[in-house]
Structure formats: structure tokens, C-alpha cells
Amino acid sequence: MKKIIIVVLFCLPLCLLSQENTDDLNLANKILKIDEENILSNPLYHNWGSSIIKGQDGKYHLFYAQMSKEIGFRSWLTDGIISHAVADSPEGPYVHKEIVLEGRGPGYWDAYTAHNPRIKYFDGKYYLYYMSTNTGGRLLLDEEFNQARNGVITNEFRALVRMNQRIGVAVSESVNGPWKRLDQPIVEPSGPIAQITCNPALAERPNGGYIMIVRGDKPNIKYANGKWPDHNELIRSQAIALSDSPLGPWEIQPKLAVGDLNSEDPAIWYDSKRKRYYGVYHAFGYMGMITSIDGINWEKAKHYKVLDKSLKKSDGTEINANRLERPFIYVEDGVAKVLTVAVFENNKNSYSLFIPLD
């Protein structure tokens, strides 16, 4: 009898640890149907990647990327802005409030565009992370800049602007601003990524410090002979960076988060119930989910596939997206509440979509 009791007492902590580390999150089964209030569209602007935070006022604050429809969707690299909208519920409806960030012009590292925001709250301050770029000190003529704005990826001038993409941050004591930008980007490409850093995803680590997953290019893909590789040759890689401060310095780790999978734009969070990190990312045709116990070693989650390009609405119709990208998971009280995505539909309009989760 004593032996049985000893065995039970010995196994109990191991069983509890196993339950805590269980990878049983199934986001696909939590997706609910969409109403019109879950869509944020604008007749003058393309809406793209977005990020939600609950403010101290009890309202939900959305920071999202926009590009003028008059200039065109491809102007995200040169003319993007970051706007602020507010709602009483995390799934909307959101009401536009103001533009908060845009390119500062020649002479600044973030001369052109402000794109793909991530809003976080750490230690009493709000941190608005974003991507921007410049021309590396080269002054482009109007025609050259128009090529950078609307050209294909192999265009010399678009390639120039593309390879100067970096991540920056603006800080405020209020979710309503004012926002103070750092004078320099906060993370440079190194190790397993080259050329660029963009599209950050961040989480606070449970034992202290911060983790960022940042996108770059596979190092063996080079800009050469005045041309950049086309999309079929370009491999997008997701690196892991660690820091003791939300402002950096950030140290990129040698191991990639998503290995050899061609992927973009993860959103990460720490699941305190399951004692592990999760990340949802754009896997070119669908949304996939990865997971990690330590934030360094990532693998496909048990319930890997989250979402494809077809979504059901409550009125019986469907959204069939040409592109479905820039995922973000809004988490409240440890529970995933909303999956936000950017939708490009009918090859002419893009909007922000807030998918409620059960």
C-alpha cells in the first residue's frame, strides 16, 4: 500500500506538468461566423495588417495599416500610414479616429511608409512597433520614385527601397498618444536572416525579458546585377530575437522559428494555461499555427491548420479572398478572443476582418 501511495505521489507532479504543457489549442474549431460589424473598410484606403489592445479607458484600440487607393495597393512600401480606430468590443465595429504614423521624409531612417503595426503594453507604457524604409541616402527622381512605388519586385528602385526595410518603435504613456519615435531602427538583419527586418511579432516572456519574431530574407538570396530575385526565388524566413527591454538591443538567435517553410507575418502570444507559446502565420494559401515551450524551439502545432481563404458570414454568404494575410490574435485574460486578418478581395479592395473566436 505504501509503495502505491509513493508511486502516485511521484507521478502526480509529472501528470500535472504534462497537462500544463499540452498542445491542445484548436483555433479552427473556435472560429465563429462573421457579421458586417466585423469588417472595417474604407472607400478611399486599402486596409491591411492590424493589431488590437484594450486601453485603460475600457475600450478596444485598433492600430492598422492603410494605403491610398488613388496611389495603389503596392504603395505599402513607400506611402503606407498607420491609423487608429476605437470600438466597444474587440471584434468591432471599429470607428476610425486618426492617423498616428507615416513616413517622416528624407533624412530619417523611416523616410517612407509606416506599415504593419504591432501595439503592446509593457510596464506602464504603450509600444507601437512598425516597419519603415528609406533609399539608403540616394535621392530618387520623381519617375524613379514612381517605379519604386508601383514597380515589380525586380525593379531596381523598388528593390532599393525594399532592402532598406527595418523595424522601429514609437512609445507613449497613453494609447491616444502623443507618440515618440526612436531615432534609429531597433533590430538589424543577422544570422539566419539577411537584407531586411520587418513585420514584428512580440510577447513578454513569463520569466522576464521579451521575444520578437522578425521576418527577413534567406541569406543566400542576394540582390545582384541591378536586379532582385522574383517571388518564386525569394524565401521569407522568420527569425527569433531576444531582449531584456522592449526597446532592445535585440539579439537574433541562430535558429529560425519556422524552419524552411516559406512564411510571413506571425502573431505570437504566451498561453499561460498551457505553459507554451503559440504563433499564427500566413503560409501562402492558408493560416498555420506553430508552438514552442521555450520560445526558441518551434514546431508545427498539433492542430496546425487554422484557416483557409474561404470564410462564412452569418447571412449565408462567403468571403473568398484572393489574399488572406497579416494575422493577429487578440488575447484577453489568457484566452484568444479574436483573429484579425487582412483580406484582399476581387483583386481590387482590401479590408480588415475581425473573426470572433468561441
Image (cartoon, rainbow, N blue to C red):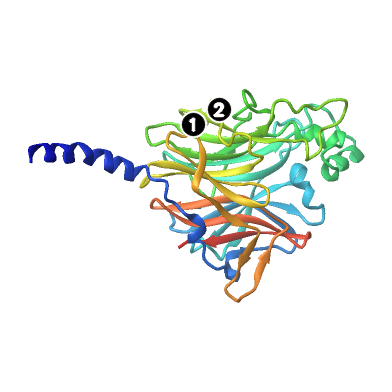
| Residue 255 - label | 2
Compute the Cα span from label 2 to label 1.
Answer: 7 Å
Q: Quadrant of the C terminus?
A: bottom left
**Which residue, given by chain and number where applicable, does mark 1 sit on?**
296
331 versus 317 height, above or below: above
353 versus 110 height, above or below: below
- Describe residue 232's horizontal placement relative to residue 225 as left or right: left
Circle 2 residues within 10 Å: few <14, some 14–19, many ≥20: some
Q: Position of residue 350 (x, y in %)?
A: 71, 58
Label 2–label 1 contact, CB within 8 A: yes
Whether residue 55 is visible to the viewer of this picture, yes or no, is no
Q: Position of residue 353 (x, y in %)?
A: 61, 60
Q: Nearer the viewer, residue 245 or 9?
A: 9
The residue lying at 59 percent from left, 56 percent from top is 307
As drawn, the residue found furthest toward the bottom would be 315
As drawn, the residue found furthest toward the right would be 143
The residue lying at 44 percent from left, 51 percent from top is 25
276 versus 346 height, above or below: above
Circle 1 residues within 10 Å: few <14, some 14–19, many ≥20: some
As drawn, the residue found furthest toward the left would be 1
Q: What amino acid does circle 2 point to?
A: Lys
The residue lying at 50 percent from left, 29 percent from top is 242
Determine whether the residue tagged by mark 2 lies in a helix, strand or loop.
strand
Asked which quadrant contains residue 232, the reply is top right
Determine whether the residue tagged by mark 1 lies in a helix, strand or loop.
loop
- Describe residue 97's horizontal placement relative to residue 60 as left or right: right
Q: Position of residue 7 (x, y in %)?
A: 17, 37
The residue lying at 70 percent from left, 26 percent from top is 219
| Residue 136 - label | none
Q: What amino acid does circle 1 point to?
A: Ile
The first of marks 2 and 1 along the sequence is 2
